[in-house]
Image: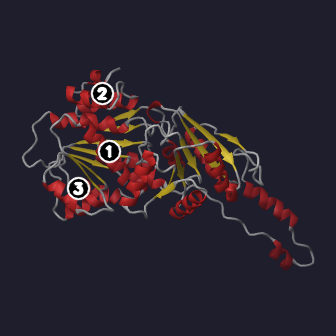
Amino acid sequence: MSFKKLGLSEALLKAVEKQGYDTPSPIQEKSIPLILEGSDVLASAQTGTGKTAGFTLPLLQLLSQEPPLRNRPVRALILTPTRELAAQVYQNCKQYSAFLDLRTAVIFGGVNQKPQVATLRNGIDVLVATPGRLLDLHQQNVLALNKVEILVLDEADRMLDMGFLRDIKRIIATLPQKRQNLLFSATFSKEIKQLANGLLHQPILVEATPENSTVDSINQKIIRVDKAQKPHLLVKLIKEGNWKQVLVFTRTKHGANKLTKKLIAENISAAAIHGNKSQGARTKALGGFKSGDIRVLVATDIAARGLDIPLLPHVVNFELPNIAEDYVHRIGRTGRAGASGVALSLVDIDEMAYVREIEKLIEQRIVSEVLPGFEPENQLTPGSKSAKQNNRNRNTRNSRPSSKSSHQGNQNRPNRAKQGGKRNVR
């Protein structure tokens, strides 16, 4: 099927062609006609399958069917969880509206608000925003939302994970009751469905792919290694594989900074991107990574849904996320738009529980291997029972208290190690 058969205008078809696209993805094919009809839509699709165009293209067409309103009040509001994703959606809107008389703006925190305020006061039709900055400027009476015709929640599950539910409800309270609502998400949870029930009016459910699945074009692999050896193994993989562009995920901001310094010490150009970095630093790091000046971008999960890097070949989980769904979003940065990609996870024995949760979520086993010279002390495979449990059983047998002194036995008994588990966020 072509984009033309979806009912898009000539101006949008021209813009899509200019971007090099000729065939809609499954989520675009299913959602665009429904949105053009004015339906509320609850859509789910894999990361990297074109969700953004799935709502921006029909949204722009609906707005362009009528002349711009006087003073150009905000007619379409797109909410995103992160600054990076907001910037990405904004760029898409700008590209697709190149031949339309529509104005688009983006606002987010972490930067000076004055340029954003000036843009808003000149009048815009489409506003892309993160919840915090939007509420802040609304409270300052910089913008009004009483003319919004279309509301989009992009990556809604991530917004709930990041604690934006209260802000979302406050924003919705400022909008007209009569409007079209679009909720796009990579995953569906109970909380997402509850949000949809309170927000959407007779929504049409669109699922382009199985929930929480990973695209076939991504080659997933686990390399088992001791925690202390992970930095050395990563350096070896990058250098010997001659990897030119690698996105590496860590679990913490401190971990991202620490790993970045180690890579730089090995003469590998690297930069970290996370919530403690200023927006200027984040933009500079991402720009350098896209241009090739920076070889490795080390990121926390704040970047998992906002990075759009064409033909990114490698994603590495230096540490597995403690929420299984985040694994899907992380590796979804590669294998986008039909391109192939490789997603490697460096897994130590303490992360085996996370592996099982991930495999359960995506309903498939991930190939696991050990590299020569980096053999872990404990050789358990992901399907085995907890290594910590094995160690406890072995240590307990070796340190049973003698009949002479139960007190001495208690001193010899090893402490129970805390096991990592899935954080109950959803």
* Left or right relative to 240: residue 30: left
Q: Residue under circle 3?
A: 173
**Where on the picture, by quarter, is residue 29?**
top left
Q: Position of residue 400 (x, y in %)?
A: 87, 68
Sequence-wise, the earlier of marks 1 and 3 is 1
Q: Residue under circle 1?
A: 89
Q: Is residue 420 above or below residue 24?
A: below
Residue 358 vs residue 170, the one in the foreground: 358
The answer to the question of whether label 2 and label 3 lie on touching residues, with beta carbons closer than 8 A, is no
The residue that appears at 25% across and 34% down in the rendered structure is: 58
Sequence-wise, the earlier of marks 1 and 2 is 2
The residue that appears at 64% across and 38% down in the rendered structure is: 365
Q: Mark 3 packing: few (<14 Cα in 10 Å), some, or many (20+)?
A: few
Residue 294 vs residue 207, the one in the foreground: 294
Q: Residue under circle 2?
A: 17
Q: Which structural element holds mark 2?
A: helix
Residue 160 vs residue 220, the one in the foreground: 220
Q: Position of residue 69 (x, y in %)?
A: 9, 44
Q: Is residue 162 above or below residue 215?
A: below
Q: Which structural element holds mark 3?
A: helix
